[in-house]
Amino acid sequence: MHCRVLHCTELDYRNTFGEHRYVEGADLFICGNYIYNRYTDCKDSNYYLSADKINDVLCLPTERIPEVTPILACQDRVLRVLQVCRGIF
């Protein structure tokens, strides 16, 4: 498996976003309290405004699903599965 290192000198997420981060290849997934952002090759490529506070973010394995699918674990005990900038469930 070939992995690329995501290096964004212009993207300073440490002070801007919360502590919830996930990296998959060239994609960086970052969540604040209610906002999810996806960066692909250091460019903003996706976002989602959650109805409840986001506790964590992870992605489904890409071995079985061709597209990266982020999942948000929220304070209201709901797992929000995202696809192309909108909630599926």
Image (spheres, rainbow, N blue to C red):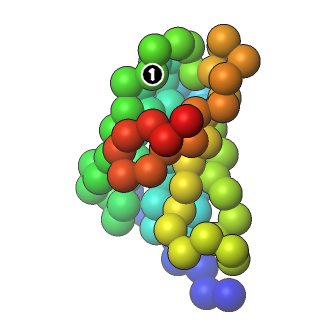
Residue at 46%, 15% (x, y): give it.
51
Q: Nearer the viewer, residue 6 or 68?
A: 68
Quarter of the figure that contains the C terminus: top right
Residue at 29%, 52% (x, y): give it.
45
Name the residue tied to disc 1.
Answer: 50
Is residue 47 placed above or below 74 in the rendered structure?
below
Q: Position of residue 18 (x, y in %)?
A: 53, 24
Residue at 54%, 75% (x, y): give it.
66
Is residue 69 placed above or below 30 in the rendered structure?
below
Q: Position of residue 48 (x, y in %)?
A: 37, 33
Quarter of the figure that contains the N terminus: bottom right
Residue positioned most to the front? 89
Left/right of residue 65 with respect to residue 50 in the rendered view? right
Q: Nearer the viewer, residue 44 or 48?
A: 48
Q: Nearer the viewer, residue 88 or 72?
A: 88
**Quadrant location of residue 37?**
top left
Residue at 69%, 74% (x, y): give it.
64
Q: Nearer the viewer, residue 30 or 63?
A: 63
The kind of residue on which mark 1 rests is Ser
- Helix, strand, or loop for circle 1? loop
Left/right of residue 5 with respect to residue 49 in the rendered view? right
Classed neighbour count for the residue bearing mark 1: other residues with Cα under 10 Å, few (<14), some (14–19), many (≥20): some
Using the rendered image of the protein, determine whether residue 46 is visible from the camera's viewpoint. yes
Is residue 27 placed above or below 53 in the rendered structure?
below
